[in-house]
Amino acid sequence: MVDVMLIHPNVNGGNPVLFPSVKVGYKWDNLTSAEAAEGLFDFTEVNYGGFANPIITIDGFIDLEDSRSNVVTQKFLVDFATLRSTTPIKLIVPCPYSSGTAYLGGRPTSGFSSSGDNTLSGTINCWIQNFTIEIASDSENLWKYTLTLIETRE
């Protein structure tokens, strides 16, 4: 589990909103096609047509008893989801490990290189695609949420 932050100038006064102890998923899809040919009993050639914007999922809990002003709430999720701005949301995913901290990387500033040599940025520009909240009667003060973001350009 990691603590991640979302930042946008129009949400929480531009201060980071903390998403504590969450599970993060990162999904990359290449746009490929490999059409099978009738009568061909071998692999076909794969055609590469680019890639889709990566999808990031964040699973966590809203703790109704957490009184910190910068921790995720339903209001913050709605504030991020309803943004209509030319400035994307910044997602920061620090992942501490024994020798330091690694960051889930985002799109390189100059775009991706097809040579296979990319330097990823330490933040991910994104927009909220959707979120869900589940409230269970056995844990009324903890609301489970799943937040889905889509990476974008600056």
Image (cartoon, grey):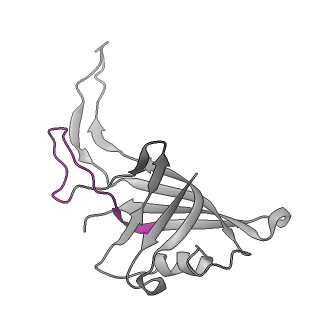
- Residue 113 part of the magenta-drawn span: yes
Front residue of 38/53: it is 53
Q: Quadrant of residue 99?
A: top left
Q: Look at the picture and state if 66 lies above or below 110.
A: below
Q: Residue at x 41, y 64 (%)?
A: 91
Q: Quadrant of residue 11?
A: bottom left
Locate residue 150, reporting x and y percent: 39, 61
Q: Residue at x 15, y 58 (%)?
A: 110
Locate residue 49, reporting x and y percent: 21, 43
Residue placed furthest toward the right? 138
Locate residue 90, reporting x and y percent: 37, 69
Q: Look at the picture and state if 134 lies above or below 102.
A: below
Locate residue 121, reporting x and y percent: 28, 56
* Dominant secondary structure of the residues highlighted in magenta in the image: loop
Magenta span of residues: 109-129
- Residue 91 part of the magenta-drawn span: no
